[in-house]
Image (spheres, rainbow, N blue to C red):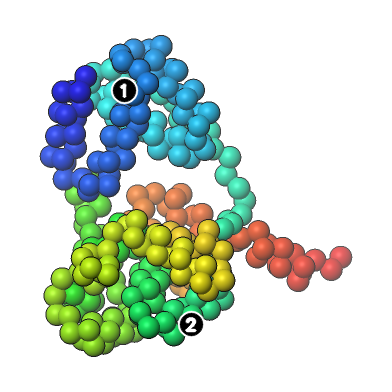
Amino acid sequence: MQHIVGKYKARLSQEQLSANTIKAYLLPVYTFLNIYKKVNAENVLSFQKFLEENYRPKSANLRIIAFNRFLNFIGKSEYRMKLLKCKQASYLDNIITFEQYRAFKSFLSKENEKKWFFIVSTLAMTGVRISELVQFGYSDVCRGYLDVKAKGNKIRRVFIPRTLQKALKEWLDYRGQTSGSVFRNNRGQSITIRGITKGLEKEALKCGLDKHLVHPHAFRHLFAKKFLEKNGDIAMLADLLGHESLDTTKIYLRKTSQEQKDLIDKIVEW
């Protein structure tokens, strides 16, 4: 079976998928093979129960989609698993507020190392995924945008707002940097996804913020919410975020539970 997995990995590489995407597609395959020896109806059904019991519905579905793709590749599409039904809340939670974001940036601006200030600013002002943030280079800052490869070999343009572009350029000039990755670790190498995640948690704790609020995706949420407040063009937002369906983008139209409570407290007087 290992040689088949090797061929599958080669096929994914031929599709020019990112390393993270390939890893996500292979993860449930490796998990399955660590538990079962053969791909048959009984084992696939057992594997689905395993996913249901060990992961939240959304996470389990991502693994089901990935494993179903592998089943198609090996000619076992008749064993494809059904997606789990996800209960969608009528509100958003664990989303950093604009006030918390401003306070966090203010704290970071006073630190000797401005790297985290600009990481947070870039995440919140462009809406990029963390996997895209690590791709930012000096030349991207100079021209004001970054082109990233999306699914199906599509190109999505991430725009750098003029104010952020100017601030980033001044910071890079101050550091004497004229090429290479914008965000680097202490060894001068391109910072990793893990490095950003752990670094943000560390800075959040120093600032007195809940580390669960200061995850990279939280700033993507913030970008989407603020964009809709200022503009309201959900179709454009979907393009900016790289969503294939407006249904994915519509979640940002929802308010947080605290925002709902504040609104109810304000308007309900009967």
- For the point 35% across and 49% down, which residue is it? 244
| Residue 56 at x, y percent in the picture | 52, 38
Q: Note whether 261 is above or below 170 in the view shown.
A: above
| Residue 170 at x, y percent in the picture | 26, 87
**Callout 1, which amino acid?**
Leu
Q: Which residue is mark 1?
A: 33
- Nearer the observer, 132 or 106: 106
Snapshot quadrant of residue 135: bottom left
Q: In what element is the residue under mark 1?
A: helix
Snapshot quadrant of residue 62: top left
Q: Which residue is mark 2?
A: 106
Disc 1 + disc 2, Cβ < 8 Å: no
Give the side of residue 166 with respect to residue 253, left or right. left
- For the point 28% across and 81% down, which residue is it? 168
Q: Note whether 160 is above or below 191 in the view shown.
A: below
Give the side of residue 265 with respect to residue 158, left or right. right
